[in-house]
Amino acid sequence: MAFALNTYPITYRAKFSDGKWLSEYIEKPHKTQEEEAAMSEDDRAKLENSRNYYDDMPLVNYTSQYGLACFEGLKALPQKNGGLAIFRPDQNAARFARSMKGLFMPEFPENDFVKACVETVKRNVALGFAPRYNSEWEKDSFMTADSVYIRPFTIAEGGIGVNLSYEPCVMVINTPVSAYFSSGNSDAVVSDRIRATPNGTGWIKACSNYVISALAKSEALKAGYMECVFLDAVHRKYIEEGSSCNIFFYLKSGELITPELGDTILPGITRASIIELARDKGIKTRERQISIDEVLEETNECFVSGTAAGATPITSLTYKGKKTVFNDGKVGDFTADIRDTIKGIQYGVLPDTKGWLVHIA
């Protein structure tokens, strides 16, 4: 299923006007999940599509015309003992506020962000829209597990000239989601494209950043790879990140390296969580520049991280036509351990000793 444009009935909307945020929860047409599943494919598609459109939103605006917007992505995950839990929403709230500030928008209050995410999920659950825990997911370390994807995003007010957004809307929608990467392929390729430049918006989760990522990822997929990796814009030799995820290298020395943050790399919440977990395990973990040459010569294991990716292994990296295989093409012990740890916490199989989960009854 991966991402599916099947928006759940309850949506949150907040509009900034006269210096304050005015919020509401909107219930779109729906039946029960069971009734919708029993509908014909055409009728179900019409009903689902009706939840994706809002007649009172401006068609021509600074978002639709110039990509002036930012967004977040987080999940509500079914728990082994029942219910759902959102993973570290406070961190997404803080990053969302930073992104809006970086785009010169009025910042959305972090407490309101968390409340909106929790409440939309809770209201959709009350209508029967949520996956249930399946013990079969444990067999593949939750790589194909279902969850509720929470997508907060901004939409600018109406306008056609190049301008900033002073009275944006903040929307929060829920959709079903499962595995992001397809199974059976864990190869990556270094892209010739440049994702972000210094003094740009690479550190912001800006919609416009994902145009290059989508192009590069499409090129990688057509060439038979699962993922693409970007180099820096200045020296063209330092690893930055993947198409929509951060990246880690477990070196032959036993050290874990991830590119240090700057204004060209998105500060991922999963990235920060993995760094903390690795250090808890006694792994020497550093955030620093790492060149493509060092990666190809010294890496034992590699994986990418993100809300959608979790901790997904990369078993080979191709650069300038030369393929380098990591750990004999197998998922490494460290990668498997960190993947299982973070997924175990998220799905309630392992104890949440850090208080990262916000539970929803």
Image (tube, helix red, strand yellow):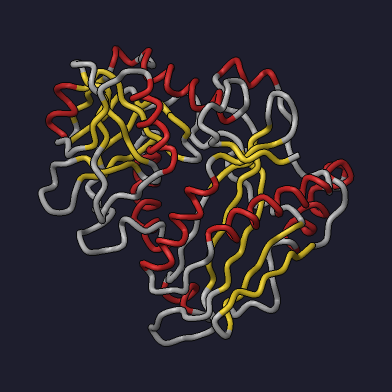
Q: Can residue 143 be seen in the rendering of this structure?
A: no
Measured from the top left, where is residue 239 in percent x and y? 21, 40
Numbered marks: total: 0
Viewer-proximal residue among 51 and 183? 51
Measured from the top left, where is residue 162 in percent x and y? 38, 83
Image quarter of the N terminus: top right
Measured from the top left, where is residue 29 in percent x and y? 83, 61
Identify which residue is drawn at 14% across, 22% down: 297
Q: Is residue 165 left or right of residue 173?
A: left
User: Is 54 rendered above or below residue 207?
Assistant: below
Identify which residue is drawn at 43% across, 29% down: 311
Q: Can residue 126 be seen in the rendering of this structure?
A: yes
Q: Is residue 253 left or right of residue 270?
A: left
User: Is 207 rendered above or below residue 300?
Assistant: below
Measured from the top left, where is residue 272 in percent x and y? 38, 38
Viewer-proximal residue among 332 and 361? 361
Q: Quadrant of residue 56?
A: bottom right
Identify which residue is drawn at 31% across, 57% down: 202
User: Is 187 rendered above or below residue 222?
Assistant: above
Image quarter of the C terminus: top right
